[in-house]
Image: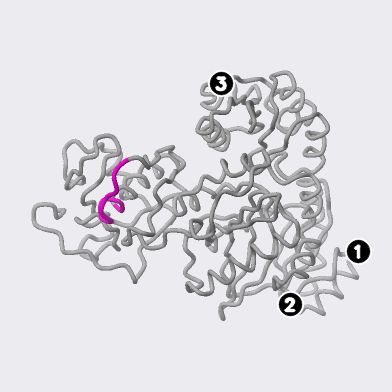
Amino acid sequence: MFSRVLIANRGEIALRILRACRRMGISAVVAYSEADRDSRAVQMADEAICVGPAEARRSYLSVASILSAAVVTGCDAVHPGYGFLSEDDTFAEMTRAHGLTFIGPPPEVLERFASKAGTRQLLGRHGLPTIPGSDGMLRDDDHALAEAERIGYPVLIKPSAGGGGRGMRLVRSTRELQQALTICRSEARAAFGDDSLYLEKWLDDNRHVEIQVIVDRYGNGVHVGERDCSVQRRHQKVVEEAPTPALDAAQRTALAEDAVRAVVAAGYENVGTLEFLVDAKGDAYFIEINCRIQVEHPVTEMLSGIDLVVEQIRIAAGEPLGIRRRRSRCAGTPSSSASMPRTWSTTSGLRRDPSRPSRSPAARASGWTRTCMRAMRSRPTTIRCWASSSSGVPTEPRPSTGGVWRWGSWWSTDSRRTSPSIARSSRTPRSWRAASRRTCSIAWAARPSWPRPPAPSPDNART
């Protein structure tokens, strides 16, 4: 195991990696730019080192600065987080050349999965269905027009070297395609340094579902459930929901197992996310893979109880996968005590202590409610909870409340006591009551299969 890790990132993900390192007893060094000198990650790190000015190109994207910082501070591994150098195979190779470990997929794996078009063909050969698209990269405008006619409009222009909505355009006619190709090439070149494009058939009625997988270097792989990110703006994810309402339990299991089987056969290693489009019939089509930890990983951690960053570090250190397939199942029904994880974490850093005695399903669900509220205060665009009834089991807001959240019992991780009617208590922080009325993103929601909790008594019913 590593003794000292350099965190080559900033903001929330730097704190997230720092927390995982402390959990594992690893000393953490934070690399920061001059703009982040007073950031929380720098203040909490065991050691911090400046790697350049505020401009990312001269600090977080500077390979020489990052590697020099790792060598000078005596680190034996580098964690890139997400963005910046997290999927740069050249940086991973140079990290290895300097006697350091890149915490993420090895450089040969990053190179193999670098091209989205190539990845579609690779995993397609291992059994994953793919959306009809162009045969390789678009050579020129004439080739693009011919491929679009063969596929059939509407089509989606996508850059091969990156994502995040940059360089992507939906076109519905030949005229739109001719105009969009120049714009997409320019955007892709500016964002990724590569203007390679390819085409995909556009599905008008679809859901965007991603499968979280973990694979070690010994060929062992598991999935950690799925996330639904269908609500997007300009191809940027706005809402993450789990489990997805687009698939039933059997379809979810089949899709996740097919995803794990394909990436293991293709030689993938470490934590990754496979993205699919699901049409109105429930058929899933693979579109791309993200070879890194993702921004939305806390949603999966909350439902599975698995620390994905810790798994990243362990696999990079050469340890075999320690997660059994049955443990990797996500908790889809908080009303069942068997499905609730014994340990879990959120963006706020609140974690359930596994040494504490087991509680009833209502108390556990109530603990989830409080944790989600903590996370919502930390990151309002990530977490949303349905109202909690007097029994502590989440339920949909009733029409009589006018959409205002009702809170029943809640479980305190500090005192082990259950206090009723938090919404009416004068000791309740005002920010909590205000946060309960926000319109935030759905991380997990009540399902029709959940049992309806008993009606609240007059003592704890909100007026």
Sequence order check: which comes first, mark 3 or mark 2? 3
> Which amino acid type is shown beneath numbered disc 1?
Arg
Q: Residue at x 73, y 28 (%)?
A: 66
Q: Quadrant of residue 122?
A: bottom right
In front: mark 3 or mark 2?
A: 3
- Quarter of the figure with residue 21: top right
Under mark 3, the amino acid is Asp
CB atoms at circles 3 and 2 under 8 Å apart?
A: no
> Residue 318, how many percent across, how many down?
68, 41
> In front: 156, or 312?
312
In what element is the residue under mark 2?
A: loop
Q: Is residue 101 left or right of residue 440?
A: right
Magenta stretch in the rendered image: 356-365
Q: How far apart in space, not on screen, are marks 3 and 1 (Cα)?
A: 50 Å
Q: Which residue is mark 1?
A: 139
Across and down, in percent, residue 262 comes to: 70, 65
User: How far from the left and from the top, in percent, is residue 383?
Assistant: 43, 50
Above or below residue 402? Residue 314 is: above
Amino acid under disc 2: Tyr
* Front-most of residues 289 and 173: 289
Q: CA distance from mark 2 to mark 1?
A: 19 Å
The disc placed on residue 319 is none
Residue at numbered disc 3: 46
Could you tell whether 369 is left or right of 263 in the image?
Answer: left
Picture quarter with the N terminus? top right
Compared to residue 374, the image places residue 194 above or below, namely: below
Asked if residue 364 is among those painted magenta in the image, a careful observer would answer yes
Task: Answer few, some or many: residues within 10 Å of disc 3's Cα (few below 14, many 20 plus, some between 14 and 19).
Answer: some
Residue at 67% across, 55% down: 165
Q: Is residue 276 above or below residue 53?
A: below
Q: Position of residue 121 (x, y in %)?
A: 79, 67
Q: Disc 3 on helix, strand or loop?
A: loop
